[in-house]
Amino acid sequence: MTKYVVTPEQMKKAEAFCENNGTSLATLMDNAGKAIAGYTADFLPIPEEAKIVILCGGGNNGGDGFVAAKELSKIGANVYVMALSEPSTELCRDAFDRCKANISGELVTVSEGIDTMCEHIRNADVIVDCIFGTGFHGEIEPVTENENPYTVPIRPVTNIIKAANESEAVKISADIPSGCNALTGEAAKCVFEADYTLVLGAYKTGHIHNPCSEYSGELFLADIGIPDSAYEEYEAVVSDDSVIEKLPERKRISHKGDYGRLLNISGSENYVGAAWLSTNAALHVGTGHVTLCSVKSVTTAVSITLHESTYLPLTDKSNIGTEHINDILSAAENATAVLIGCGTGCNEDVAKITLSLIKYAGCPVIIDADGLNSIAPHINEIKDNNGMVILTPHLKEFSRLSGCDMGYIQKNKLAAAKLFARMYNVHLLLKDAYSVYAAPDGFTAVNLSGNDALAKAGSGDTLAGTVAGLLAIGGGINEVVTAGAYLFGKAAEEAALIRSTRAILPSELPEQYGYIIS
């Protein structure tokens, strides 16, 4: 099953495809409800001893919840359903009726009182949010400027969500947290704050944008019976373990020359660590030969602990300068990939060197950090390239490169990345909690691997070295860059199985690579 990112409208087309090809919407709802029930049951070691509260709206998302309640009741779970409005669709009405006849606990409607609902919520062990689906936008219950948004019973849904958020129960959203816009990721003033979100069928564009990504908690994807062929339109694919399998295989009978030569132009007197981190990462992905090209103070310092790399010391100055541009271009002739920018400093010399590499290097050129900041004023000069330029900016660096406002980028990562990659003929890895990769040929992918261990200085350098090292080994740029981003995030997830994300350092993550890739 390929994992897709779609807009709400594209999801509707996929569902319509199913209905036109023998799988009814009622079947999809049953599948969704069963998936929600199965996922919820994982939090119930002894179903009879836990209290589950399912919050249901009047649309099809509510219908999914009613089905889930019926299915959980079958296994003896203690299920209470809070029906926050009258069913507004035929599918929801049918699911409501079946739930009412088969629920193990109680089905409470708004007419029976918000206080009763809130009491059930306060005593819940698990709360499942099925209030609004992908069609939600705007505010849940708009209020006037001087009105208290939590006045009972005028704002019943708002009060229910507030009570749920204050609960210590495990909170699960079905498809998307209620109050979030599935297209843009924007959020209402009152939003269900999920610990986990069970995404139904395909990820929605809103999931990868803030603040929806913050309210969604950990994302899990449920197969509800929609085949790949139904997604004739989609925004991106999602990287998973399969991208690792596309990396070039290693052969028993081989030598270092078979696994590429990376020239890493990184570091300066003030940023020795950036050079060490990027070089170390490249070595750990299996690059045959890695050369660190930097000022002497950096190469001397790094060589003390990284013995497998070779070194090209350039000058006694504090920063890499253009006086050695011919030496750099000469070294690049023998490279199968070049990385530039990690800790080099942002200046015109770095800009000139980077632009020269784009023009003359006959291999992939990966530009990160200070390399990106240095070429930002010269962005139009990169358009004429050989199609092997890879940019790895975070959101602020991308704002400098593209001239787009940060607020716009945060709400339109996919669209902004796609347009930029096509306009400048580059491969773009836009780094964020959920990173976006866009290629000039229109291919787009989203990476969901990773955790808050990556929110530390040095992560970008380690990721750049990881991607650059893999590109040096070989393979298609689309496949290798997405694999590198996924591998880096996966390493953080694996490290977190052993100890707190608080204490994990970016320098330690490449040690995990050997356990993830063979």
Image (tube, grey):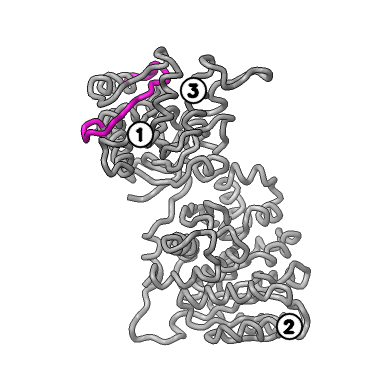
Kind of element beneath mark 3: helix
The image position of residue 327, as x and y in percent, is 69, 85
Of the numbered discs 1 and 3, the one sitting upstream in the chain is 1
| Residue 295 location (% of width, % of height) | 71, 82
Residue type for callout 2: His
Rendered image: mark on residue 324:
2
Please give the name of the residue rendered at 65% of the width and 54% of the height, measured from the top-left corner: 398
Outermost residue to the top: 111
Q: Which mark is residue 157?
A: 3
Instruction: Residue at 59%, 43% (x, y): give it.
Output: 412
- The answer to whether residue 389 is left or right of residue 373 is left
Q: Are marks 1 and 3 in contact (CB under 8 Å)?
A: no
Q: Is residue 179 above or below residue 196?
A: above
Q: Nearer the viewer, residue 517 or 347?
A: 517
> Is residue 23 something one can see in this rendering?
no
Indicate yes or no whether the magenta region holds residue 275: no
Kindly identify the amino acid type of the residue bearing the numbered disc 3. Answer: Val
Residue located at (33% from left, 37% from top): 36
- Amino acid bearing label 1: Glu
Q: Nearest the camera: 133 or 330?
A: 133
Q: Which residue is mark 1?
A: 15
Image position, residue 396 (x, y; %): 67, 53
Residue at image coords 32%, 50%: 1
Work out whether residue 260 or residue 105 is closer to the camera in this orientation and state it.
105
| Residue stretch in magenta | 73-90
Q: Is residue 63 in sight in this rendering?
A: yes
Pick whichever of labels 2 and 3 is earlier in the sequence.
3
Whole-angstrom CA distance, mark 2 to mark 3, is 66 Å
